[in-house]
Image: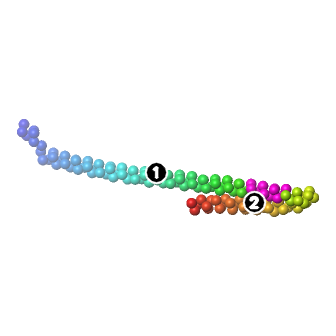
Amino acid sequence: MAEEGKVSQEVIERLITRIDSLEKKLAEKEKKDKKKKTKEKDTTKKITDATGDFFKESGKLLRGVVDASVEATKEAANALSSLSDETDKEGLGEIPAAFVSVLRRTADIQKKAIDKFEENYKKDDDD
C-alpha cells in the first residue's frame, strides 16, 4: 500500500516532459493567434484606407463634373444672350454675323469646362 501511494520518479519525469510539451504548444498557439490578429488589423486598415480614398476621389470627381457642367451651361447662356443682344442692336439683318460671333464664343465652352473641372479637382487635392 505504501508503494501504491508513492509515484515513481519515472512517472514524474514523464509528466514534467508532457507539461513542458503542452506549454510549448500553448506558446506557439498564442504566437500564431497574435500574428493572425495583427494581420487582420492590417487588412482592416488597408480596406478602411482604400474605402476612404475611394469616397474622397469620387467626391472630387463628382464635384469637378458638376462645376464643369455649370460652367458650360453658364457659357452657353452667355453666348445666347450675346446673340440676342447683338440682334437687338443691329436688327434682324445682322443675324448671320451675330450667329458667327456666337459660334466663336461657343468654341471655347469645352475648354473652359475642362479648365473648371481641373481647377476644382486640383483644389480638392490641396485641402
Q: Is residue 40 left or right of residue 67?
A: left
Q: Is residue 3 left or right of residue 119?
A: left
Residue 29 x, y percent position in the rendering: 32, 49
Dominant SS of magenta comes to helix
Residue reaching furthest front?
89
- 10 vs 97: above or below: above
Corner quadrant of residue 122: bottom right
Amino acid under label 2? Ile
Q: Badge 2 local density, few (<14 within 10 Å), some, or many (20+)? A: some
**For the residues marked 1 and 2, what is the alpha-carbon distance in whole angstroms?**
45 Å
Residue 25 x, y percent position in the rendering: 29, 49
Amino acid under label 1? Thr
Can residue 96 be seen here? Answer: no
Q: Which mark is residue 44?
A: 1
Q: Quadrant of the C terminus?
A: bottom right
Corner quadrant of residue 84: bottom right
Q: Are marks 1 and 2 in contact (CB under 8 Å)?
A: no
Residue ID at (65%, 62%): 119
Q: Quadrant of the N terminus?
A: top left
* Label 2 sits on residue: 109
Write down the region rendered in magenta.
Answer: 73-84
Residue 54 x, y percent position in the rendering: 56, 53
| Label total for image | 2
Can residue 116 be seen here? Answer: yes
Secondary element at image label 2 = helix
Secondary element at image label 1 = helix
> Which of label 1 and label 2 is nearer to you?
2
